Amino acid sequence: MATTNQPTSSNRPEGAELESEARRAAMQGVPPFNAEPAKRSRLAQSFREAAITAAIVAGLTLFFFAFRTNIATGGLDLAFRPDLWLIWIAIAFVARFLLSYFVFATESPITGFFKRTKSERSSLPIGKILGIVLLLVALTLPFLLDVFLPRQNRYLLDLAILILTYVMLGWGLNIVVGLAGLLDLGYVAFYAVGAYSFALLSINFDLGFWVCLPMAGLFAALWGIMLGFPVLRLRGDYLAIVTLAFGEIIRVVLLNWYDFTGGPNGLLGIPKPTLFGLEFSRGENGFAEYFGLEYNPIQRFIFLYYIILALALLTNFVTMRMRKLPVGRAWEALREDEIACRALGINTVNVKLTAFATGAMFGGFAGSFFATRQGFISPESFTFIESAIILAIVVLGGLGSQLGVVIASVVMIGGIELLRNLTVLDAVFGAGFDPTQYRMLIFGLAMVAIMVWKPRGLISTRVPSVYYKKKKAIGADLVSQGEGH
Amino acid sequence: MSAASQELMLSIRGVETFYGKIQALRGVDVDVHAGEIVTLIGANGAGKSTLMMTICGSPQARSGKILYRGDDITHLPTHDIMSRSIAQSPEGRRIFSRMTVMENLQMGAILEDPSTFNADLEKVFHLFPRLKERRSQRGGTLSGGEQQMLAIGRALMSRPKLLLLDEPSLGLAPLIVKQIFSAIGELNRTEGLTVFLVEQNAFHALRLAHRGYVMVNGSITMSGTGMELLSREEVRSAYLEGGAH
Ligand SMILES: Nc1ncnc2c1ncn2[C@@H]1O[C@H](COP(=O)(O)OP(=O)(O)OP(=O)(O)O)[C@@H](O)[C@H]1O
Ligand SMILES: [Mg+2]
């Protein structure tokens, strides 16, 4: 009977473990290379790579270095100035050659480094360092801009605020999509609810930003629960369609409920946030006067910047903490297998609702920030394209990756903005070329390129939230990707 | 094999379960006493997994009664049933493949008092040393046998009184099957864990179990002690042809 069996651990065949260990160890080394012919081709290979690099540099810097516009009588005069240009090409050529020949063992191309599966690498030093650097830059950004780019200060700060708003929205949506695995195509609805809650509360009841902020979050969370209830039975494609419809319903209601929301005219006169009652305005009782500073409109932008930075960091912090709590773990488990979750006694209804509500709440916070920043809102700002952009940020960044969301926001929002100003392209495509018209086309191409190049998003490794003694990074091969598995 | 006390742990009476219009269970009666290992065998599609899931309330029985320690649980929601010290390792393992072994085990203990977590973890690691070696590996990259150990280990993390196992031997090498079955036997002997086991591997299951039931087309056709069923000609011809290894 069962009693005759030995305890489990001794049932393994003698030496089987050793053998499999040996096999695993053998597979970790670098495959043996044929050293002799490699030597010759390495020189040629380095030359070729250096030549390609030089050509790219030549193309890229042609307009910056080779031409110069001088002010002449009757307009601008174009001067050809090849010396500086050639110097740069030479530098690029030599540097690349040296790098190729001595640093990158050219048998394995440099891109191989990025493609390597990092399952066995301990932790993620690069990601961590990058995170800290980004945080420091974000904390000191207004001062950095003031020192280094004083002329574009205000424009860049405004752009930074916009990017941070999307970072926050991305992090909020990441809870629903990245962690709980519920595809939400109508996230902008919660953004809208937050914005309108704040606007209506402040206009009708004369409440300030700081009072309305938590209320706006609460309202949005409530809407999240209201949406959650009917769609709990749905998953995947069906859920996506219903959330898409929900987003549109909210927008259409805002558009048509004229008496309450102002319809297409939107709502005007939304108050600005204050610092403990100090307004950022000229004159008496203003922030500048109180602290004895000279009034400067940039102060308000700096203040707004720090508000959204704090809100975004709060979102990140809460998400990270939640991941370590049972509810966060349950979100992730729900994404993996709903039936198994039920078998473990998890109330999947509640877990989904908390995910929806938490994500919606942060959307609501971001919405009320948006309202106070703009001072004016209308349904125009909450169209489907917004949901799509936020979702694209989450997916391109790498589902579930916090750092990925930041990078994707900077690339996408900053990139769209950059394309507005690329008058350089005129020189390539002729004077009539208006880059803003091709903005979305270029943007779409970039997204396609990222998904082809990195189907698991920009940041494709993950660090587990629970580990035993040693933290190990999770290889990209285990992160979900755009192939539908 | 008369170690089992007479307290009735699980009592299933006249249970009928439907998937839409299809009737999967046609009035099933099964009793499981405290401290027993009871096995349910039957051909593919007989309704074994359906009975297992009906106990857990997903799907719920359309008629009949399921009593767990005297309480009627027939129409309770699944999460209520599963929080009454019943644990299940469902068919096909269903571990969380993108979470690590540790995270999977944590999920098993998610409703429990965290103070007992370490002790429970040690117990599971003692039972399946292989899991300890692989604790920071992703569930989906474990071998089939290791995944089965993880599924059972995860179920044990909730300190169950009644353990429901659906085909723990599915797709495993004979050696691993033996390991898993001896682990189940050990739990039953040392901790008095009650086990309800659904199996295709009738030979091993009936040898391990105190009592067994045979299910055909959604009804119970035979029952008796494991040894009795093993010696029955009908059982041998239907479920053991060439299977006695
Ligand atoms: N979700 C479902 N919807 C419709 N019919 C189902 C569903 N699940 C199971 N069935 C049907 O119910 C019957 C019993 O299935 P069940 O899974 O309980 O069989 P089983 O005894 O566990 O078989 P196996 O040994 O192959 O696992 C089968 O005819 C099956 O096709
Ligand atoms: Mg089955």
Image: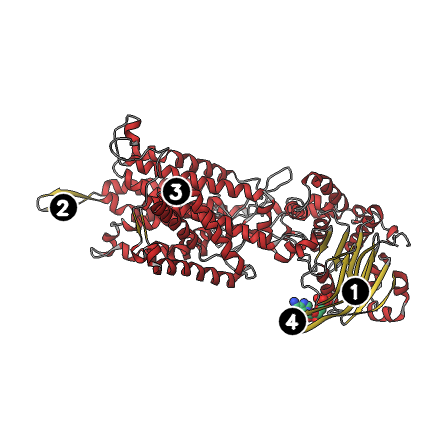
- Badge 4 residue CB within 8 Å of ligand 1: yes
x and y percent of residue A40 in the render?
46, 46
Distance between mark 3 and mark 1 Cα atoms: 79 Å
Quadrant where the image shows the N terminus of chain A: bottom right
| In the rendered image, residues at marks 3 and 1 fall on the same chain | no
Q: Which residue is mark 4?
A: B20
Type of residue at label 4?
A: Gly
On the rendered image, what quadrant is the C terminus of chain A found in? bottom right
How far separated are the C-alphas under marks 2 and 3? Answer: 36 Å
Secondary structure, mark 4, is loop
Q: Which residue is mark 2?
A: A76
Residue contact at pointers 2 and 4, CB within 8 angstroms? no
The residue that label 3 is drawn on is: A96
Instruction: Please state the horizontal and vertical placement of residue B212, each as a whole percent of the image.
Output: 84, 62
Q: Do the residues under discs 3 and 1 have CB atoms within 8 angstroms?
A: no
Which residue sits at x=73%, y=50%? B85
SS of the residue at dot 2? strand
